[in-house]
Each structure stands twice: as structure tokens, then as C-alpha cells.
Image (cartoon, rainbow, N blue to C red):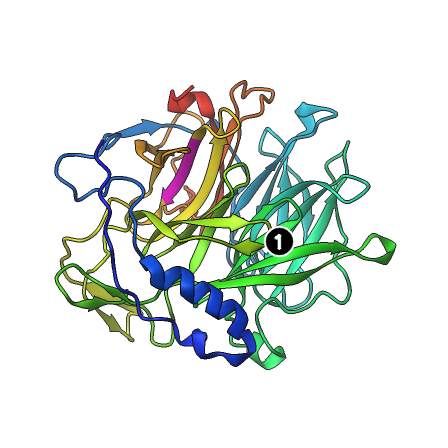
Amino acid sequence: MEIRVEKFNVRPPAAWTDRDNLGAMRRTAGIVVLVALSTAVAAPAHAAGKPAGDAKREITAIVETPALFDDEAGGDADADDPAIWVNRADRSRSRVIGTAKNGGLRVYDLAGREVQSILPPDGGRFNNVDLISGFGPQKLDLAVVTDRGLDQLRVYRIERRSGHLTDVTADNAPLLFSRDQAEVETQATGYGLATYGRYAVVSRRHTTRLGIFRLEEQRGGRIGYRVTDTLDLPKQFALPDGSTWSPCLEPGEDPQVEGMVVDAEAGVLYAAQEDVALWRIPLDRDRFAGVPRVVEKVAQFGAPGVYDPETEECTLGETKFGGRIAADVEGTTIYPTGKKSGYLVVSSQGDSTFYVYDRRTNRPVTSFQVVDGPRTDGVQHSDGAAVTAEPLPGYPHGLLVLHDGENTPDGGRVSTDFKYVDWRALKLR
């Protein structure tokens, strides 16, 4: 497959004038200005010929979790993002941990049954969750959550045998991005999340900013964190026809990132900038390093748009610059087959499709949709995704868990849940 390099000119984000973050901004400005939005790692979908793996497969889930209802009677619970914890002492007691926004966290067993429910602190709204293994001298397993309501991380210790979660967040946990409580109220707060080692990459809602935070132990077994680096992705792009484009959004918002995953072996962060593209960003321990590159642009990339304040929607024109992913590009997860081999799975929320890329080269491999089956309904408008290659009871080649944004039947109430997919259904291993 021919790989074509594309170059764009990018105007530096306004945040680069922020004197409080001048050091970090000089570094990230240097990264982006060198090659800008720059290089398509995978062959772009609009290149001559059909990209590899373009035909969509249809597969089914075999387990689903109980419906969550985003209304007063349901506790304003709205499923969003899952993580999979493998119980080394007893794999049959492995757990799926899912965020439920105002409903906090839900913990499920491999049969999809709820085994624990955790409410957020007052004012909290849990958005994304990811795991850290072997943390600190006690080699703890942790579940880390972005609390977008309070602009903080919350940290939960996972008991090694039972899988029970206990809150160990430090009392003095700082705000992630906001300067004070008044800024928290604007809800430009911690949003997406990906962990590696003792670090968490967090995105900021309604902005292009990413931050790296180091988790640190405190007295009494509590865990806090501190920022080690920041990066602003572009928000304006020069198109090949000479025009400048920004995605159509509500006034005052910039194109945000939510879905993220870190390939620790490769030293790479994959970040889904929802209305723009899937990025590949080099990491160096606690720093962003090298040139961010594009794996694939969304189909709407370059499309002119007009925002309607009455409908709170954008009307988009035609574009010839986009890729295959129907915005928003969302959940990202990695299925390893070796130290650096395997697959990157990405949610194309706009058309309820998932795209699979080669982990090493980022070339397209296949795409699939989860449709109605004998045991569950399908998956629509998926936000979060998580996968493990570890053999589990009923999943000998691994488990893929997907957020379902339109669970059915809903009985007239907004219903969401998580669907479990046997990795063998993808026929990739």
C-alpha cells in the first residue's frame, strides 16, 4: 500500500500566548509548527483506490449489562466508557468497570451482572475510566476516573481477589485544568483519559488541550497527582485548495479530544479529536515528544458548516478532503498480539462502525458493526471501548467491551449499556 504524506499549515492556538504555560507551549508549538497537522500515517481514504479492509463485517455481542437510564428515576445514569480488569488470582472473577456519568461507576462480572455501584462525590460526573497495574511498592491495581463535574481525577484501589473498588483519592487532589471553582463551573474540565505506567493523559472538554499527570502516593495510602506536561492540538487547518477550515461547533467551543489509548511499548498516544481526526502522538515518559501525526481524518474534514442555535446542530456542506470515520471519532483501544504487534480499534460514532488498524503500521485492516443478534441488540453511536487479549472464561482469545449509546428496547426512556463481544467474532486471530 502506498503511503501518501500530506502537509498542512496550522495557526498556533490562542493558548500559546498564555504566559503561565509559556515553557510547555514553546515546546509544543515547536512540535506542531514543524510539520503541523502533517502526516497521514495510514493511506488516506480519499486516495486512489479503495483502502484495505473497507468492507464492513457484521458481528454480534453475546452479553450485555443492565440498562442505565438517564432520567431522575434512573439516577441520571448514562453509560459512557468501559475498562477491563483481569483478576490474576481467579480469572472468572475478572471485572468490567464502566462510567455512568452522574450515576458514577458500575462494576460488572463476566456475565454482565452488576456487582458494585459507586456514586460520584457531590457535584461529580464521571466521564472516562482506565486502569493502572502494579502501582507503587504494594503493586496496586487502580481504576482512574475523570470527574468532569469537579475537574479532578478520582482513584480507586481494586482488591486483588474480590475486584472490589475502594476510593483512595487524596483529599488535596488538585484541579486538572481550571484555575478556580468559578472556572470549574464553565465545565471546560477533565474529559478523556488514557493511562500508562504511573501516568494519566487527560483531555480538556471544549478545548484542544491535553495534559500528562503523574500519580503519586501520599500518607495513609491516598493517591494524588501533579501535571508534568501539556499539549494543544490544532483547531484551524489549511486545506489543499488554499482555504482555512475549522470544524463547525457551538460558539465558544474548540474541537475536543475524548477517546484515547496509550501504546506504552511503542511510546505513542492515540488521541481521537472528535470532529477532526485520529492522532498518533509520541510520548517520552512524562512528556509529549516528536511530531503529532494523523492516522485518519474524519469524513467531514474540510466540510463548511453553519451552526443553528435553535437546533444546536450544524448543517454541513460537501468536502473532498475527509477520510472514512464518521464524526465523532471516539473510543480507542489496543488488542496486542505481541510486544509491538496487534490491532488498534477505533469507534466511528457517526455511523456506528468500528475501524481496525494494524498496531505497528496503522494501515487499515478491517471494519465492523455490531448488529442485533440472538442474545443482545446491536451497538449504536458508541463512545467508549476496551479490549483485553487475556484469555478469560467464555472468551479464550480475549474480550471486547463496547458502549452502546442506544440500547433497545428502551420503553420510552433513554437507555444505554455495555456490550461484550467475543474477540473471535472479528476473525483476526
- Please state which of residues 46 and 57 is positioned toward the viewer in this rendering: 46
- The residue positioned 50% from the left and 70% from the top of the image is 188
Residue at 36% across / 32% down in the picture? 372
For residue 314, side relative to residue 288 (left or right): left
Q: Residues within 10 Å of mark 1 (few under 14, many from 20)?
A: many
Viewer-proximal residue among 358 and 53: 358
Task: Name the kind of residue labelled 1 in the image.
Answer: Val
Q: Is residue 41 above or below residue 339?
A: below
Front residue of this view, candidates 101 and 362: 362
Residue 383 lies, in percent from the top left, at: 43, 48
Residue 131 x, y percent position in the rendering = 63, 43
Residue 194 shows in this picture: yes
Residue under label 1? 145
299 to 47, vertically: above or below: below
Residue 272 placement (x, y as % from top left): 40, 51
Q: Which residues are magenta?
A: 343-347
Please tell me whether residue 31 is drawn above or below residue 341 in the rendered image: below
**Residue 124, position in %: x, y?**
63, 64
Asked whether residue 100 appears in the rendered view, the answer is no
Q: Residue at x 57, y 69 (%)?
A: 177
Residue 344 colored in magenta in the image:
yes
**To which quarter of the image does residue 92 belong?**
top right
| Image quadrant assignment for residue 305 | bottom left
Judge from the rendering whether residue 235 lies leftward or rightward of residue 73; answer left or right.
left
Q: Secondary structure at mark 1?
A: strand
**Residue at left offset 69%, top offset 29%:** 87
Looking at the rendered structure, the number of numbered marks drawn on it comes to: 1
Quarter of the image with the N terminus in it: top left
Chief secondary structure of the magenta span? strand
Q: Is residue 177 magenta?
A: no
Closer to the camera in the image, 185 or 136: 136
